[in-house]
Image (cartoon, rainbow, N blue to C red):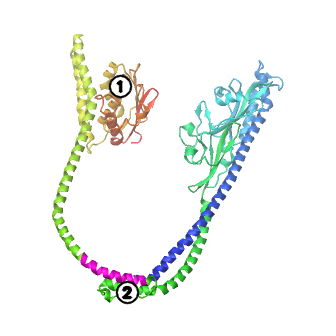
């Protein structure tokens, strides 16, 4: 479809005008967006201040409860009863046991009326619990029995409480609750609030309330809207509260989830990546603080922006339409002479005008007149250029014909060269594969050959000692036949490893491990290495010979490590339970910097000629790719553990 120049100019003007208006609108929109962002940040800061105030008030409420409980008259009665030889308090006319029970019931009542508190303890100055009321895993509040009371003398919070002056209230760091030194499960994020109880100006005991901060802090209990989040963070940057529970208490659970990885705390507030973020330190003691942070999405900003964009779009369309209309009228007036020149140019292109004498120009004193003169000059030069081009075409055609004659030979030579390179690469690949197999076989044969050699060497001494009889020879032959058969099986198994037509068969894992140990036991005993086996029989659907090679590889590596490090009381532990096989030693372990590389092909820490680096690589291939299980290595205690997990099969 042909479009006239006037229409094009009008369309161009429409686009340019629209872009101009759009640019001005965008600048205005940018300023409005900044205003919206600042408004969101201001609102978020207001909510943050309110949240900080509420959390402080929640902590003050706990402090009040601690002070109130510490003033309970039964505590002084307990003090007097403890110091009485008959455990009797003459003032209250009551026994120690009865007084503890009454105080426990008081604690119980407080726990029942406060969902955030999960235990209240009265602990003597020797660290032994005197009275404890707690919520058991079912949520029922009970008074702890006397025989279940613990000694908290070694706990950090107890030591800090014992250093408090009279009337000082203690607030602990926030961590996960522990009972008997073990993390409670489900995990309970805990803050401990307590004080030291003085009687006759001496510390008699400490009173402490353990609270679940997720239930204690109202801003956490009161769910924010889906586009807002609140975060609590400790002084080291670890999350204490996050909607994503996986990120919380990394310092307790060995995870490096910190707020610094998600937000920039160098700014008190900012708007970035469509997220508004504000934070503030909340000092709940003179030297302890937590960070309270809020974030929200740009949902409100998007809503305001959408409305503003719709209004701008209407203004842009109206303004652009009128600009285009006036431009079209003006262009129509100016375009007529250009149309005539266009007609002449078309005639020249189609061959209707063959010489400059046939061209009829336009007489005008403006740019159109100059264009007409230029067009006539161009026509003259075209006539000269046409003759020059014809001569050039003839010369180039001759050169092209000569080039075509040589092109076929050049292509054939390059093709032959590429084929030779491909053959060389294929040969190199084949040799590399053969090298891997030979290295692996050599690695597997070294130990059986050594064992046969030692048996033959010892045969002479056994003969001289008079130990050689028919039974001895039968045992000697049978044992070495097993080793030779194992070596033969190794060749078959490695050949099968590269085949795709293997079939899996069920076999007893315990039997396979014992078969492998039977070949190694004499040498292990000879090197003063004790093997401790804790076996549980289970069936594996896989390749028995390959599995035995893996067991042999790992035991040999353990033996080499024990001998190389000259370990006294050298031991290898084999445990089989719940379809998991664990083989570990006390040989000193593997340096952490190379632990991740031990399963790489050709990687070895042994001296030249003592290892190919293929044993563990082949073992991992067998267990994970051929048998669908999992093989990992890790340092444990004073050695290394190789762990095969067949639960994923």
- Nearer-the-camera pick, 649 or 471: 649
Depth check: give the residue in front, 533 or 58. 58
Q: Is residue 487 above or below residue 189?
A: above
Q: Main secondary structure of the magenta part?
A: helix
- Relative to residue 580, is residue 156 drawn left or right? right
| Above or below: residue 382 compared with residue 73 | below
**Image quadrant of residue 370?**
bottom left
Q: Which structural element holds mark 1?
A: helix
Q: Relative to 68, is 308 above or below?
A: below
Could you say where residue 197 lies in the image, as x and y percent from the top left?
76, 29
Could you tell me which secondary element the residue under label 2 belongs to?
helix
Write down the quadrant of residue 518 in the picture.
top left
Residue 631 appears in the figure: yes
Q: Residue at x 48, y 78 (%)?
A: 11
* Residue at 49 percent of width and 87 percent of height: 333
| Magenta-drawn segment | 369-388
* Residue 350: x %, y % from top left: 31, 84
The question of residue 386 being in magenta is answered with yes
The local crowd at label 2, few if under 14, some if 14 to 19, many if 20 or more residues have their Cα within 10 Å, is: few
> Closest to the observer: 512 or 347?
347
Residue 478 within the segment the image draws in magenta: no
Q: Which residue is mark 2?
A: 343
Q: Quadrant of the N terminus?
A: bottom left
Residue 559's disc is 1
Q: Give the residue furthest to the right.
A: 91
Taking 276 as reference, is 550 left or right? left
Residue 287 vs 300, above or below: the answer is above
Q: Residue at x 73, y 39 (%)?
A: 62
* Distance from Cα at disc 2 to Cα at disc 1: 97 Å
Residue 16: image x %, image y %?
51, 74
The residue lying toward the viewer, choosing from 591 and 248, is 591
């Amino acid at each position: 479809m042909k479009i006239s120049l006037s229409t094009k100019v009008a369309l161009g003007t429409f686009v340019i005008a629209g872009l101009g208006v759009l640019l001005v609108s965008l600048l205005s929109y940018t300023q409005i967006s900044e205003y919206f962002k600042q408004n969101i940040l201001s609102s978020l800061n207001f909510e943050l201040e309110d949240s900080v105030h509420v959390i402080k008030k929640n902590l003050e409420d706990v402090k009040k409860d601690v002070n109130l409980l510490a003033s309970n008259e039964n505590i002084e009665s307990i003090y007097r009863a403890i110091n009485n030889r008959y455990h009797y308090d003459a003032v209250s006319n009551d026994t120690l046991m009865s007084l503890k029970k009454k105080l426990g019931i008081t604690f119980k009542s407080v726990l029942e009326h406060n969902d955030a508190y999960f235990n209240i303890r009265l602990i003597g100055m020797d660290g032994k619990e005197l009275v404890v009321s707690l919520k058991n895993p079912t949520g029922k509040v009970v008074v702890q029995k006397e025989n279940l009371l613990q000694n908290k003398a070694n706990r950090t919070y107890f030591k800090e409480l014992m250093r408090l002056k009279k009337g000082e209230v203690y607030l602990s760091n926030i961590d996960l609750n522990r009972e008997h030194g073990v993390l409670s499960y489900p995990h309970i994020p805990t803050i401990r609030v307590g004080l030291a109880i003085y009687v006759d100006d001496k510390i008699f005991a400490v009173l402490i309330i353990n609270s679940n901060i997720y239930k204690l802090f109202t801003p956490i209990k009161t769910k924010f809207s889906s586009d807002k989040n609140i975060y609590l963070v400790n002084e080291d940057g670890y999350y204490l509260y996050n909607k994503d529970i996986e990120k919380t208490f990394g310092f307790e659970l060995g995870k490096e989830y910190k707020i610094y990885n998600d937000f920039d705390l160098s700014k008190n507030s900012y708007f970035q990546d469509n997220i508004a973020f504000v934070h503030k330190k909340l000092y709940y003691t003179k030297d302890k603080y937590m960070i309270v942070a809020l974030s929200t999405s740009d949902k409100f900003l998007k809503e305001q922006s959408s409305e503003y964009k719709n209004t701008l779009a209407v203004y842009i369309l109206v303004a652009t339409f009128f600009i285009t209309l006036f431009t079209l009228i003006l262009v129509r007036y100016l375009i007529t002479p250009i149309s005539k020149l266009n007609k002449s140019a078309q005639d020249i292109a189609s061959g209707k005008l063959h010489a400059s004498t046939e061209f009829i120009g336009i007489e005008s004193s403006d740019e159109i007149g100059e264009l007409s003169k230029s067009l006539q000059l161009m026509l003259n030069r075209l006539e000269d250029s046409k003759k020059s081009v014809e001569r050039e075409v003839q010369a180039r055609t001759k050169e092209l014909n000569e080039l075509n004659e040589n092109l076929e030979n050049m292509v054939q030579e390059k093709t032959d060269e590429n084929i030779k390179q491909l053959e060389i690469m294929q040969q190199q690949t084949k040799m590399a594969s053969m090298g891997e197999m030979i290295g692996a076989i050599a690695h597997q044969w070294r130990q059986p050959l050594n064992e046969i050699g030692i048996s033959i060497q010892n045969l002479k001494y056994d003969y001289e000692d008079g130990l050689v009889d028919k039974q001895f020879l039968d045992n000697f032959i049978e044992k070495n036949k097993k080793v030779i058969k194992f070596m033969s099986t190794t060749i078959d198994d490695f050949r099968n490893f590269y085949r795709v037509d293997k079939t899996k068969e069920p076999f007893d894992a315990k039997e396979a491990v014992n078969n492998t140990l039977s070949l190694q036991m004499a040498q292990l005993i000879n090197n003063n290495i004790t093997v401790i086996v804790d076996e549980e029989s289970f069936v594996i659907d896989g390749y028995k010979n390959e599995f035995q090679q893996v067991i042999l590889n790992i035991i040999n590596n353990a033996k080499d490590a024990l001998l190389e490090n000259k370990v006294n009381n050298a031991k290898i532990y084999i445990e089989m339970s719940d379809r998991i096989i664990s083989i570990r030693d006390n040989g000193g372990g593997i340096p952490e910097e190379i632990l991740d590389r031990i399963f790489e092909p050709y990687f070895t820490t042994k001296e030249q000629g003592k290892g190919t680096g293929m044993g563990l690589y082949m073992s991992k291939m067998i267990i994970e790719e051929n048998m669908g299980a999992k093989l990992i290595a890790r340092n444990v205690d004073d050695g290394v553990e190789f762990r095969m997990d067949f639960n994923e099969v």
